[in-house]
Image (cartoon, rainbow, N blue to C red):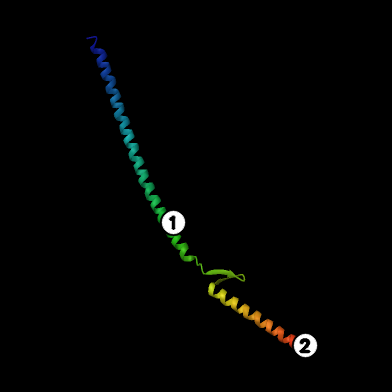
Amino acid sequence: MGKRRPLEESENKLKTWASGLDFEKKKIKNKENELKKDINSLKKYVAKENEARAGLEIDLMQSFNVNIDIFDGRMMDVDEIVATKSIKKTTTVEEVIDEDASKKKLLD
C-alpha cells in the first residue's frame, strides 16, 4: 500500500499538468484565432488603402497637364507659347526694320 500512494500522487500531478496544458492550449488557440482575425482585417485595410492610392494617382494624372508651362509670368499651353514666341520674334524683326528705315531717313 505504501507504494501505491506515490503512484497516485504522480498520477494526480500528471492529471493536473494535463488539465493545465489543455487550458494553455485553449488560450493559445484563442490567441491564434484573434491574431488571424487581426491579420484579415489588416489585409482588408491594406487593400482599401491601395485602392484609394490608385484612385488618387489616377485623379492626379488626369488633372496634371504636361502641355502647360509658365511663359511671361502666365500659365500657357504649349501652342500658346509657340504663338507668343513667334509674335515676339515678328515684332522684334519689324522693330529692327522700322529702326533701319528711320536711320535711312535721317541720313538722307
The picture quadrant where one finds residue 98 is: bottom right
Local SS, label 1: helix
Q: Nearer the viewer, mark 1 or mark 2?
A: 2
Q: Is residue 67 left or right of residue 19?
A: right
- Residue bearing mark 2: 107
Earlier along the polypeptide chain: callout 1 or callout 2? 1
Q: Residue at x 51, y 69 (%)?
A: 67
The picture quadrant where one finds residue 18 is: top left
Is residue 106 depicted above or below 78 in this figure?
below
Name the mark on residue 53. 1
Is residue 59 depicted above or below 100 in this figure?
above
User: In this view of the protein, which residue sits in the foreground, 5 or 81?
Assistant: 81
Asked if the residues shown at circle 1 and circle 2 are in contact, with their CB atoms under 8 angstroms apart, the answer is no
Q: Residue at x 35, y 37 (%)?
A: 31
Q: Residue at x 40, y 56 (%)?
A: 51
Residue 94, given in percent of the width and then of the height, sits at: 66, 83
Residue 49, given in percent of the width and then of the height, sits at: 42, 53
Name the mark on residue 71. none
Q: Is residue 20 left or right of residue 48?
A: left
Mark 1: which amino acid? Answer: Arg
Q: Residues within 10 Å of mark 2 (few under 14, many from 20)?
A: few
> In the rendered image, which quarter contains the C terminus?
bottom right
Is residue 90 depicted above or below 23 in this figure?
below
User: In this view of the protein, which residue sits in the foreground, 68 or 19?
Assistant: 68
Residue 102, given in percent of the width and then of the height, sits at: 73, 86
Mark 2: which amino acid? Answer: Leu
Q: Is residue 45 left or right of residue 29?
A: right
> In the rendered image, which quarter contains the N terminus?
top left
Is residue 70 depicted above or below 11 in this figure?
below
